[in-house]
Image (cartoon, rainbow, N blue to C red):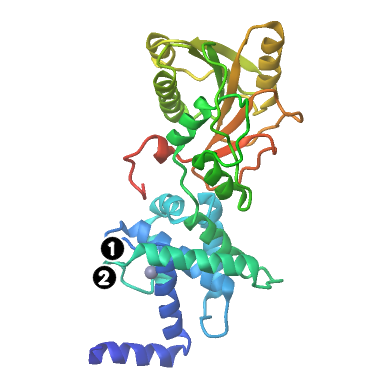
Amino acid sequence: MKASGCWLVISSFRADSNSVTRDLAHCVLHRVLGHDNAGNAPWADLAEDMVVEYVLDCLDTPHTSVSGREDRMFVCGRQFSRAGAPSPDLLAQVVRETSPWQLESHARMFVRDDHSARAGADDAAWRELSQQVMAEVEGFVRDEEGRTSALLSILRIRNRRRYDYRAFLRKFMTRRTVVRESPTDFDPIYYTYGLSVYGNLPLIDSLEQSESGRVEEFVIAIDTSGSTMGGPVVRFLEEAFEVLRQTHADGGANLHVIQCDDMVRSDDVVTCEGDLRRLVGGFELRGGGGTDFRPVFDYVDRLVDEGGFRNLRGLMYFTDGFGTYPTRRPRYETAFVFCDDMYREHDVPPWAMRIVVRTEDLMPGRPRYG
Ligand SMILES: [Zn+2]
């Protein structure tokens, strides 16, 4: 360390004996949370600093607490609620819109290190460490005062699993009725999917097949109560149709696209590329009311009863929010596909599968921090 660096440490220590350990904790926490980009925009740097300082202020340990905690907590509480979640990518958008003088005052409160000096780190090693920390905090830390809850929710965002939704689509659309169960042959995608979603529950899906030669039907229900989903919806439909085309190359499949908010608004049948182009060309989501998943199931059940569906294999519900689920298990495979950029938790009934994607998964190429 250079002499000037030494003096900086010493004078900082004199001013506040915890400031040195705080600086260290700040840098380490950046790594644990995966903040390793050296070329961030200023608002993204500040967003990362706010997240890190917030965690340290919440933990409030005897050797890392420094003055000004209440002020920082107040600013973070306000900005995090605007952002929707304590995640730097969401927070950066909010920070970006604050006035220059406010940005400066926030920088004085939260900045402790120079992010442009970040050297390449082994993210895999840090990610593993962050998963260990998360497991320890979740399993072993007794915390009646809730001091670790901020760290935990931020670690959950950091360690959130990314699903390959195309693999999921392929699997969903090629599932067959099982004639003979085989306990030793099962599909690894479903097996690991179960483990990742439920933690200790592998899903066993036999590889046996049956029923060939019948036209298979699938439903994609679209929750139209969210008004901003146009792009992702079209992308998802295109991907689903592509999978259908590849997996049912003999043309033995069709797709019902049902739009619904709190009532069914439309039902379009897609059997060929032309149908899809007509549907998504000038695609306008119909609806905008509240979210209720039940009308789609009632509608589809009625069609099944009346013979409108002869071989319905599965229903996927594409939604960006929360809605009311049917209480009874449907007679067909059901999956909920949540398009959610806000890191919210989505619970589904035990009979349904769940996959959470982000807009960037469907529409890659968007910058990480707006
Ligand atoms: Zn920092």
Q: Amino acid at mark 1?
A: Ala
* Residue 300 seen in render: yes
Residue 7 in the image: state x and y as whole percent: 30, 92
Q: Residue at x 65, y 28 (%)?
A: 290
Looking at the image, which is closer to me, 221 or 53?
Answer: 221
Q: What label sits on residue 117 in the rendered view?
A: 2
**Residue labelled with disc 1:** 38
The answer to which image quadrant residue 216 occupies is: top right
**SS type, badge 2:** helix
Residue 71 in the image: state x and y as whole percent: 54, 70
Mark 1 and mark 2 in contact (Cβ < 8 Å)?
Answer: yes
Looking at the image, which is closer to me, 57 or 308?
Answer: 308
Q: Earlier in the sequence, mark 2 or mark 1?
A: 1
**SS type, badge 1:** loop
Residue 142 against residue 329 in the figure, above or below: below
Distance in Å between CA atoms under marks 2 and 1: 7 Å
Asked if the residue at label 2 sits under 8 Å from ligand 1, the reply is no
Looking at the image, which is closer to me, 15 or 340?
Answer: 340
Q: Residues within 10 Å of mark 1 (few under 14, many from 20)?
A: some
Q: What label sits on residue 171 in the rendered view?
A: none
Residue 132 in the image: state x and y as whole percent: 52, 67
The answer to which image quadrant residue 69 occupies is: bottom right
Question: Relative to 175, is 351 on the left or the right?
Answer: right
As drawn, the residue found furthest toward the right would be 327
Q: Residues within 10 Å of mark 2 (few under 14, many from 20)?
A: few
* Ligand 1 positioned in quadrant: bottom left
Residue 111 against residue 366 in the figure, above or below: below
Q: Amino acid at mark 2?
A: Ala
Q: Residue at x 59, y 23 (%)?
A: 314
Question: Relative to 162, is 36 on the left or the right?
Answer: left
